[in-house]
Image: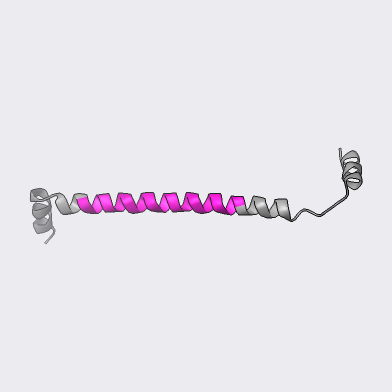
Amino acid sequence: MSTLLWSVAKENPGPGLALAFLNLVVALFLVGLSLLLGVTISLLAGLHAFVDREAVPITQQAQRRRVTP
């Protein structure tokens, strides 16, 4: 059976090329999606850290800076 499939693939490479192209498109989509999610998560984490800081008076912030080396 595999020789029959090999002979069909040699005569008509279109379906194999279409499948390879589809795999490439899906792989690129998944890479782009993971990059987009990574950037989104990092931006949300940075925004959360920026907003969630304690409201400390400036004099106490200055004292903290002097204490820490």
Residue 6 or 23: which is nearer the viewer?
Answer: 23
Residue 38 or 53: which is nearer the viewer?
Answer: 53
The residue segment tinted magenta is 18-43
Q: Does 69 sit above or below residue 25? A: above
Q: Quadrant of the N terminus?
A: bottom left
In the image: residue 33, left or right of residue 19: right
**In the image, residue 59 lies at what x, y percent?**
91, 45
In the image: residue 40, left or right of residue 47: left
The magenta stretch spans residue 41? yes
In the image: residue 69, left or right of residue 51: right
- Label the magenta part by its dominant secondary structure: helix
**In the image, residue 6 lies at what x, y percent?**
12, 53
Colour scheme in the image? one colour
At a point 41% along the width and 53% down the height, the residue shown is 30
At a point 47% along the width and 52% down the height, the residue shown is 34
Q: Quadrant of the C terminus?
A: top right
At a point 13% along the width and 58% down the height, the residue shown is 2
Q: Does 1 sit above or below residue 16? A: below
